Each structure stands twice: as C-alpha cells, then as structure tokens.
Image (cartoon, helix red, strand yellow):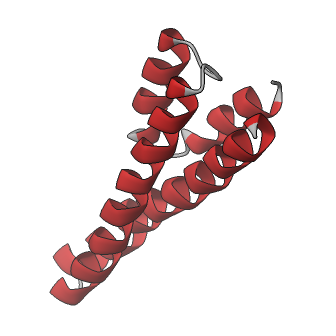
Amino acid sequence: MTKSTLRKLTVISILEGISLVILLFVAMPLKYIGGYKIATLIVGSAHGILWLAFLYVLNEARIKNLLNRTDVIKFFILSVVPFGFIPMKKSISSR
C-alpha cells in the first residue's frame, strides 16, 4: 500500500510538473504573442485538474504517514515551481 501511494505521487507530480512547464513556456507565449487564447484554456484546465489530483495524492500520503509535514510543505512549494518535479521525484524515489 505504501509503495503504491508513493508511486502515484511520483507519477502525478511528473505529469503535473510537465503540464506546468507546457503552460508557462508553450501555451502562454502562444496566447500573448500568437493571439491563441484557446492554448491557455486547454492547457490551463488540464494543469488545474492535474494539480488538484497532485494535492489529493499528497494529502493521501500525509494521512498514511508516508510523508512528514516538512515534506508536504516542500512538495507543495515545488509543485508551483517550474521543473520542481525533478527534485521532488528524486526525493520521493529515495524513500
């Protein structure tokens, strides 16, 4: 059970992190430089759903005592930083 929750956290953090990078470095330039407002609508919606899923799994890991409070705060901060999913994956994998 513990490994599956940490595996879910790893996978969802990677997906959420990649969606953030795509949103910031692809969709937003398309919107503001290219005038394609639909880009941020689509990618932003997908990113929002993935971020909520990440928060759900992060909370699930906290409830199961797989992560301490410091790790939860660190992972939360890393989830809003571009490429923060890389150190997060390394940290989760070391458990």
**Left or right: 15 in relation to 4:** left
Relative to 20, residue 80 above or below: above
Residue drawn where x is 60% and y is 19% of the image = 65
Across and down, in percent, residue 54 comes to 47, 48
Residue at point 52% right, 25% down?
62
Q: Residue 89's quadrant in the figure?
A: top right
Is 88 situated above or below 11?
A: above
| Left or right of 36 on screen, residue 64 | right
Q: Is residue 7 visible to us here?
A: yes
* Residue 36 visible in image: no
Residue, x 72% and y 31% (percent of image)? Answer: 92
Q: Hey, which quadrant is residue 23 in on the image?
A: bottom left
Q: In the rendered view, tell whether residue 18 sits above or below residue 61.
A: below
Position of residue 70 measured from the top left corner of the image (x, y, whole percent): 50, 10
Question: Is 61 left, or right, of 34 in this rendering?
Answer: right
Where in the figure is residue 93, as x and y percent of width and height?
A: 80, 34
- Quadrant for the C terminus in the image: top right
How many badges with numbers are in the image? 0
x and y percentages locating residue 90 in the rendered image:
75, 33
Task: Please report the residue visible at 67 percent of the width from the left and 46 percent of the height from the top.
Answer: 10
